[in-house]
Image (cartoon, rainbow, N blue to C red):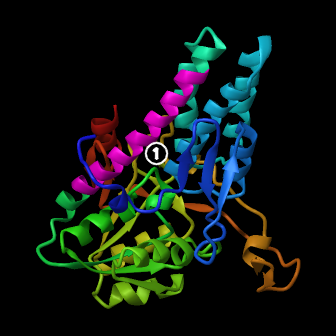
Amino acid sequence: MANTTDQRSLGTQPVRWHGDRLELLDQRLLPTDERWITADSAASVAQSITDMVVRGAPAIGISAAYGVALAARHARGDQWQLEVEQSIDQLAKSRPTAVNLFWALQRMEKVFRACSALEEAVKRLADEAMLIHQEDIAANLAMADHALKVMNPAQPIGVLTHCNTGALATGGYGTALGVIRRLHARNMLEQVYADETRPWLQGSRLTAWELSREEIPVTLNADGAAAAILASGKVSWVVVGADRITANGDVANKIGTYSLAVLARYHGVGFMVVAPSSTVDMALAEGGQIPIEEREGTEVREIRGIPLAPAGVDVFNPVFDVTPASLIDAIVTEKGAVLKPDVAGMKALFT
């Protein structure tokens, strides 16, 4: 790694590999209950991704890579290659929007195709999954360096963020939240405002939990309060993550990100997207081509079984929206930053 840091400064690790099994911190239960789920097969990893035990584009990709390693470990006989192929297909169907999932699976499949024996595949796939995990942490640290160069704060600043992009959503440290961690470490952070992020409340359950544990100054706010906060002049940058970035710089991220970008532009506040280069999908020309996952209405009508709306009322529940490149001031990856992203800027950095 180009940067070094201790385990404490990386934050809570959501994915733990034990060679024959994967442990996943059940993020549906935070902050009240810290419970680990053991996934010992590709099928159980896929189900954990679908059920949002593990979430966050980088963490999904890492978990899927370990799922392929488990598939090889449990394959048997002459059909071992077919069994691994079927597991890769099952993992690919677990979530449709985050491109990191498919990037990680393609990388694992390339290693798998080069293996002529099962014993070789078991070792090489486990090694590749661990490498993907380690590279993600290194990328997080590099992104924070690039982001601070773009921000170049002369004094401590306020930042607003949406959803969770911290250690819980990555291999460790975080993307957008990694930038916030770095600002805090440099004494350049005055305050973080964390959108609660309906309907899964990743901001209140996860982001506020991560930052509070590390004594980083955080104020939790309802999503609808973001405009008032930006109007107050207390925020210099809105910093968010991404689940897919297209060739023209359009960004798919957690639902509500698009409205934040509009608000930031109106109020003269910088809008920064921070994500690993594995999130960039140069095969898609623009954001309208991104498949947007929609989930069932119970997630909006209820919270943990408590009804919030009339039973059976129709619900529109997209997980993501697309922010046009024209509203983004900077896209930051471990490879560097694209300012005022467009097709030319994206091609210069990612091809």
Query: Does the magenta run of residues contain 41?
Result: no
Left or right of 219 on screen, residue 344: left
**Which span of residues is magenta-colored?**
122-146
Q: Name the element at disc 1.
A: helix
Q: Which residue is mark 1?
A: 279
Left or right of 196 on screen, residue 264: left
Number of marks drawn: 1
| Quarter-of-image position of residue 68 | top right
| Quarter-of-image position of residue 183 | bottom left
Counting from the top left corner in percent of width and height, residue 77 is at 78, 14
Quadrant of the frame with the C terminus = top left
Residue located farthest toward the top when viewing the structure as drawn: 116
Residue located farthest toward the left when viewing the structure as drawn: 154
The residue nearer to you, when weighing 75 against 275, is 75
Counting from the top left corner in percent of width and height, residue 18 is at 57, 41
Counting from the top left corner in percent of width and height, residue 292 is at 63, 54
Question: Which residue: 57% across, 67% down?
Answer: 255
The residue nearer to you, when weighing 332 against 62, is 62
Query: Does the magenta run of residues contain 137?
Result: yes
Q: Is residue 233 above or below residue 249?
A: below
Residue located farthest toward the right when viewing the structure as drawn: 312
Left or right of 16 on screen, residue 48: right
Counting from the top left corner in percent of width and height, residue 293 is at 67, 55
Question: Which residue: 26% across, 64% down?
Answer: 182
| Quarter-of-image position of residue 331 | bottom left
